[in-house]
Image: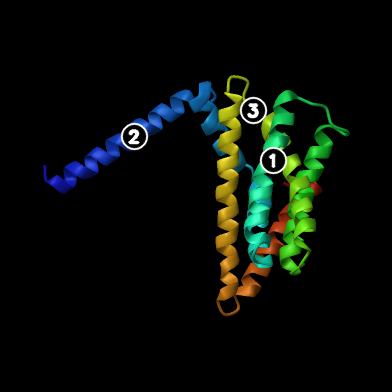
Amino acid sequence: MSPNKSFRFLIFSVLMLAATQSQAHIGQGAVGGFWSGFFHPLFGLDHIVAMVGVGLWGAFLGAPAIWLLPVTFPLVMSLGGMLGIMGLPIPGGEHTIEFGIALSGIVLGAAVLFGIRAPNWIAAIIVGLFAICHGYAHGAEMPGAANAFSFALGFVIATGLLHMCGIALGFLTLLPKGRYVVSGLGGVICAIGGAFMFGYL
């Protein structure tokens, strides 16, 4: 076997072993808690559009919002996650959380679509309020056998990656007619949020 083929076989074997180990521990202990938390936002379209929307809006507003909003969201979301894990009752219960999550897509998408330039502190408050709803949902849906800290760490890291995707898409505004593309993405996010709001998704 040639060195090149040997190297590729070794990489393939390591990846297969890693995948097997990950699947064997989902929802169990620290490892399972982390991966459960990491994949939780990635399998919810309502979460994805809002988190990408945060990055898009931050990129549109520019510094310091480009880092302020993506930092504010995970930090406050962690607090919401703790509340969800503890099962702390909130006014309106699950309906309030679902409403807040759907509304986050509508508001963040509209902000990008219409190019709303809110003051940084107001934008941070808006993002923070929505982050509590998303965090609470993550925490409340944590598997019973998962490690709470690792689960929270997983969904915070996944959230940060989604924010980065939004920021990267925001840089399309630097291209000719890129602003129209970004506005269109805002419209899509807003529409998806509206679909969740009225129960179409």
Identify the residue position indicated by label 2 in the image.
16
Residue 85: tell me if it is visible: yes
Nearest the eye: 150 or 110: 150
Amino acid type, label 2: Met
Nearest the eye: 185 or 140: 140
90 horizontally vs 188: left or right: right
Q: Nearer the viewer, mark 2 or mark 3?
A: 3
Identify the residue position indicated by label 1 in the image.
77
Residue drawn at point x = 88 percent, y = 34 percent: 92
Q: Earlier in the sequence, mark 2 or mark 3?
A: 2
Q: Position of residue 86 (x, y in %)?
A: 73, 24
Looking at the image, the residue that sits furthest to the left is 1
Spatial CA distance of label 1 from label 2 is 33 Å
Amino acid type, label 1: Met
Nearest the eye: 86 or 145: 86
Nearest the eye: 201 or 149: 149
Instruction: Indicate whether 24 appears above or below 121.
Output: above
Q: Nearer the viewer, mark 1 or mark 2?
A: 1
Identify the residue position indicated by label 3 in the image.
142
Callout 2 environment at 10 Å: few (<14), some (14 to 19), or many (20+)? few
Q: Position of residue 186 (x, y in %)?
A: 69, 63
SS class of the residue under badge 2? helix
SS class of the residue under badge 1? helix
Quadrant placement of the N terminus: top left
Spatial CA distance of label 1 from label 3 is 14 Å
